[in-house]
Amino acid sequence: MVQIRHAHIEEAPTLAALKLATFRQTFLDEGFAIPYPPADLAIFEADSYSADVVAAEIADPERQNWVAEDWDGRLLGYAQVGPCKLPHPEAGPAQGELYQLYVLREAQGQKLGKQLLDVAMAHLAKTRPGPIWLGVWSGNEKAQAVYLASGFRKVGDYRFKVGSWYDEEYIFRKG
């Protein structure tokens, strides 16, 4: 059995390790094998997944962070939302954005991603007026299908910077 709960500041190192692991599983190791230049990847990972960065995200009152935790206390997935910062002419910081939603590969198929998405969407619907936004890598058709089935629609494109590398991303909106 798994519970979805808010992340706690004291577990920032554990959540940082989960974030790094799910990023690598998704985009490097077992996933899409994007050939990021090693120096760019190292900078991106340090800037995005250090314990200090994750602690600051948890402490930020503009963001909400949830984790999926098994009964042994092991973190299996997470979601993070906050003010929209996507480069779309109709988007703005008063609206909400799903920043991240990832589940460890070994825990996929248990509907944890759907549970995390439901919690995040319910929070944004209550706290942020207008549409809900997200960015998704253009090559991640599985995630796109999940978002489309949840009522999102593709409304644009942008480039997500990983060092000097750029991922082609899609902008999705719901509402």
Image: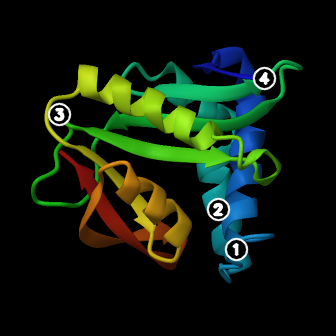
Disc 2, disc 3: CB below 8 Å? no
Image vertical order of residue 74 relative to residue 95, above or below: above
Asked whether, in this view, residue 139 is left or right of residue 103, the answer is left
- The residues bearing labels 2 and 4 have C-alpha atoms spaced at a distance of 36 Å
Disc 3 or 1, which lies upstream in sequence?
1
Image vertical order of residue 112 relative to residue 158, above or below: above
- Secondary structure state at the residue bearing disc 2: helix
Disc 2, disc 4: CB below 8 Å? no
Residue type at mark 3 is Ala
Asked whether, in this view, residue 91 is left or right of residue 140, the answer is left
Q: Position of residue 12 (x, y in %)?
A: 70, 27
Q: Which residue has dot 3 on it?
A: 94
Residue type at mark 1 is Ala
- The residues bearing labels 3 and 1 have C-alpha atoms spaced at a distance of 35 Å
- The residues bearing labels 4 and 1 have C-alpha atoms spaced at a distance of 40 Å
Asked whether, in this view, residue 144 is left or right of residue 89, the answer is right
Image vertical order of residue 146 relative to residue 49, above or below: below
Residue 122 is at least partly visible in this image: yes
* Quadrant, the N terminus: top right
Q: Which residue has dot 1 on it?
A: 39
Disc 3 or 4, which lies upstream in sequence?
4
Q: Which residue has dot 4 on it?
A: 1
Coloring scheme used: rainbow
Foreground of the two, 4 or 23: 4
Disc 4 or 1, which lies upstream in sequence?
4
Residue 142 quadrant: bottom right
